[in-house]
Amino acid sequence: MEDKSHQEHKKYAADIDSISKAQARIKPYVHITPVLSSETLNSIAGKSLFFKCECFQKGGAFKFRGASNAIFSLDDEQAAKGVVTHSSGNHAAALALAAKLRGIPSYIVIPKNAPKCKVENVKRYRGQVIWSEANMQSREETANKVLHETGATLVHPYNDGRIISGQGTLSLEFLDQVPQLDTLVVPISGGGLISGVAIGAKSINPAIRVLAAEPKGADDAAQSKASGRIITLARTNTIADGLRASLGDLTWPVVRDLVDGIITVEDKEIVEAMRYCYEILKVAIEPSGAIGLAAVLSDSFKRNPDFKDARNIGIVLSGGNVDLGVLWESLNNR
């Protein structure tokens, strides 16, 4: 069964071999993040919940896994010219930190509406910030200009096999820590995290269920899954600033084939899940990181007969880089 699963996953941008190699490559640099549980939250959910706390990863988010794999995959000649990316959030900081650890320059194109705390992280890790307008066209054009001027290597936030493989190390680690997991719930945006997690987890346990959690105000993945093709949105409206991207041509096939369902939730449900994480788990996470818990507590999950046999659920708390000013405002406006 494993051999068949292995062969099937060879057709994607990552596979269990590339994920295993990534795990060995980044081992000296990443944290093995803890798994928390809470009897109170188990009682509320009616399930056994296990929280993979990527908010305690270096850089404050899972993104450091993929960024480290990409940076330390470069040969010395490539690395010397540095790396460039465009990102409004955690990938930007993660790439800057990984580049700092390797001692190479990083050029980070950031839209002007990026959360302040995430921009400060990039600067803290000595990334060179280049501003763009708050749209994808400006981000990409600015990044291409930097590429032309520097000869640096582009590291896309999610549509990159090295990134997908690095993010997939999370699933190997999680299933080693909690082997009895039968369901994984993972935030989805561009799809790098869930692609790596789905490939890794289903290579180990083909029967495991992998579900995506997505804001209703940025539900392009759910629409794509329903229509069988990539759907992009003209605009998004969600507190989860890390979940506003669209699927890429490398991540979409994995989401299409290996993700068993997508649960969409309202922002008020995300804020409530954040509150539970703060008050019960005692963990500070950003809105994007809370969406997995929001999905499991949602009526759409609880009432779905396909999920009734989910017993041991792994929830990825993907990051903790929260702008506290925005958080307090969101809590007060509930």
Image (cartoon, helix red, strand yellow):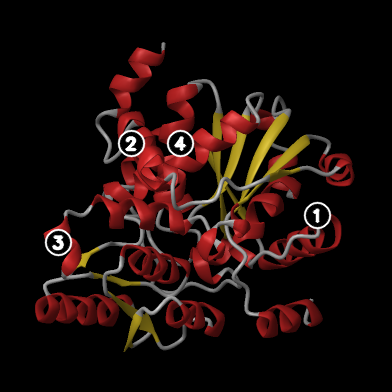
- At label 3, counting other C-alpha atoms closer than 10 Å, the crowd grade (few under 14, some 14-19, many 20 or more) is some
- The tag earlier along the polypeptide, 1 or 2, is 2
- Whole-percent x, y for residue 287 in the image: 64, 66
Reading the image, the residue beneath label 3 is: 78
- Whole-percent x, y for residue 234 in the image: 38, 72
Reading the image, the residue beneath label 2 is: 21
- At label 4, counting other C-alpha atoms closer than 10 Å, the crowd grade (few under 14, some 14-19, many 20 or more) is many
Residue 39: image quadrant is top right
- At label 2, counting other C-alpha atoms closer than 10 Å, the crowd grade (few under 14, some 14-19, many 20 or more) is some
Residue name at image x 41 percent, y 88 percent: 112
What kind of element bears circle 1?
Answer: helix
* Left or right of 171 on screen, residue 289: right
Q: CA distance from mark 1 to mark 2?
A: 33 Å
State whether residue 109 is above or below residue 20.
below
Q: CA distance from mark 3 to mark 4?
A: 30 Å
CB under 8 Å between discs 3 and 1: no
Reading the image, the residue beneath label 4 is: 198
What kind of element bears circle 2?
Answer: helix
Q: CA distance from mark 2 to mark 3?
A: 20 Å
- The tag earlier along the polypeptide, 3 or 1, is 3
- The tag earlier along the polypeptide, 3 or 4, is 3
Q: Is residue 242 visible?
A: yes
Reading the image, the residue beneath label 1 is: 281
- The tag earlier along the polypeptide, 2 or 3, is 2
Q: Amino acid at mark 1?
A: Leu
Task: Tell which of 24 and 212 is nearer to you.
Answer: 24
Residue name at image x 50 percent, y 59 percent: 219
Residue name at image x 20 percent, y 79 percent: 141
Q: Amino acid at mark 3?
A: Gln
CB under 8 Å between discs 1 and 2: no
Closer mark to the observer between disc 3 and disc 4: 3
